[in-house]
Image (cartoon, grey):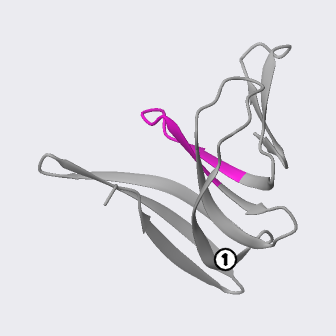
Amino acid sequence: MSEEKRVIVRAWELNRYTQSNARGYRLLQILLNPEDQEVLAFGTREANNELQLLTFPVANAREELKIKPERKLEGMTHQSRFVAAINTHSKGSLAQRNLLIAVVEGPAIRIVRIGLNPP
């Protein structure tokens, strides 16, 4: 769950939670693939409205997050309405991973595909 500049992870026990700092960023949405050691997030730099795809390694509680901006998402701001999902499919022995983003733009929906495999 994202609360602006903090990432709060709750356990099934309601009285237990941990928190890490996301200094310099506003995190709006987080995607987590259980097989990865990195978290994908959508967010902006402080005092900036341009939406970016961000990554950071899974951190221990109360640690500063080491956020790495991956790319700016053209035409998207912190107010954009969107839904995102990770799509994985296999071609032979290779697995292809893509991030699919459906962006609502007025009466239309634009689909953005971003490859997540290393170059």
Identify the image quadrant of residue 118: bottom left
What secondary structure characterizes most of the magenta part?
strand
Query: Which residue is rendered at x = 48% and y = 64% of the image?
Result: 100
Q: Secondary structure at mark 1?
A: strand
Query: Which residue is rendered at x = 75% and y = 52% of the image?
Result: 27
As drawn, is 53 to the left or to the right of 24? Answer: left
Q: Is residue 34 magenta?
A: yes
Q: Residue 13 in the image: x percent, y percent?
A: 77, 13
| Count of marks overlaid on the render | 1
Which residue extends farthest left? 92
**Amino acid residing under circle 1:** Val
Query: Which residue is rendered at x = 49% and y = 39% of the image?
Result: 33
As drawn, is 33 to the left or to the right of 67? Answer: left
Identify the image quadrant of residue 15: top right
Q: Is residue 51 magenta?
A: no
Q: Residue 26 in the image: x percent, y percent?
A: 80, 55
Look at the image and give the residue range highlighted in magenta: 29-41
Above or below: residue 17 compared with residue 99 = above
* Residue 80 visible from this viewpoint: no
Identify the image quadrant of residue 32: top right
Crowding around mark 1 (Cα neighbors within 10 Å: few <14, some 14 to 19, many 20+) is some
| Image quadrant where one finds the C terminus | bottom left
| Image quadrant where one finds the N terminus | top right
Above or below: residue 98 compared with residue 75 = above
* Residue 30 visible from this viewpoint: yes
- Report which residue position mark 1 lands on: 104
Query: Which residue is rendered at x = 81% and y = 14% of the image?
Result: 16
Q: Residue 70 in the image: x percent, y percent?
A: 55, 61
Q: Residue 117 in the image: x percent, y percent?
A: 34, 55
